[in-house]
Image (cartoon, rainbow, N blue to C red):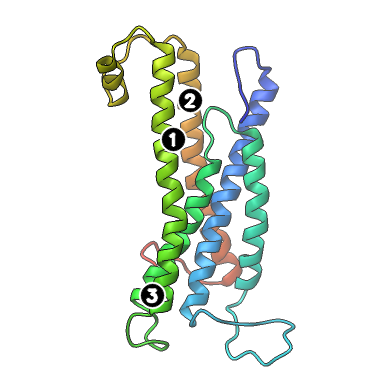
Amino acid sequence: MSRIDSHTPTSIVVRKVFWTFIGLVGTTGALCVLFLSMRAIMDIGGVCASGNTPFEPRVECPDGVPGLLVGSIFLGLIALAIYAINTFSINLVLLAWPALFLSLGFNFFDYGISPPPEFASGAEAGWIICGIVFVLMGGVPLVLLIFAVLKGRESRIRNLYPQMSLRQRLNMSTGGTPPPDPDATQRKQRTYAIVLHVVGIVVGIWAGMELYEAVTGSDVSIGFR
């Protein structure tokens, strides 16, 4: 993660902000496209084939979905690398893994509990099992990451204010009123970074939905099915 301070040239700051935004939009958009492409395939039973195959496909893949599925994986990794190199103050790289597996796990649960009626009359155990595996793969690292962040925050407070009592430090870590911040510049920079990340994620989701609709010719509703 890059560090920016008052001595960093403006040109470098602008470049970092730009590429952080591009990387974040690309990563979020790719994840959105992958999420929607998976749902399109599960709509037709979860298995399809198209293109140069050595056999006659039983079910053709939806138009544009195979390319989107493969492209979202590789372009998403490239965008994540761009983001990781340029981001500052906030680094969400480690959240990419939980976001991937939890979102795809949601799809498995959604279609496992309520599969398309033309393919199953009740719950689909195979998809539900996959959902459990994916949620564990994404949820466990997320919980560990949250604990690590909270522990790191307490350690930073202890290092900054060693003279404070344990009660005072606990009060700070649970939302109490902290003493004057010795580094207001970093806090201000982090505020800007939070805004940049929120906007980047929202734009990425919107761009992913627009790209999916443009390539497949379908409409994506917020409520999905």
213 with respect to 54 (left or right): left
In the picture shown, does residue 33 fall above or below 119?
A: above
Q: First in sequence: mark 3 or mark 1?
A: 3
Q: Residue 10's x, y, as percent?
A: 66, 19
Q: Residue 206's x, y, as percent?
A: 50, 53
Q: Looking at the image, is mark 2 or mark 3 nearer the viewer?
A: 3
59 with respect to 136 (left or right): right
Q: Residue 63's x, y, as percent?
A: 61, 77
> Decide: marks 2, 1 in contact (CB < 8 A)?
no
- For residue 225, say whether it is visible: no
Image point (48%, 25%), residue name = 190
Which structural element holds mark 1?
helix
Q: First in sequence: mark 2 or mark 1?
A: 1
Which structural element holds mark 3?
helix
In the picture shown, does residue 188 fall above or below 17?
A: above
* The C terminus: image quadrant: bottom left
* The N terminus: image quadrant: top right
Quarter-of-image position of residue 132: bottom left
Which structural element holds mark 2?
helix
Relative to the observer, which residue lies in front, 99 or 27? 99
- Label 2 Cα crowd, 10 Å radius (few <14 / some 14-19 / many 20+): some
Disc on res. 112: 3
> Decide: marks 3, 1 in contact (CB < 8 A)?
no
Residue behind mark 2: 190
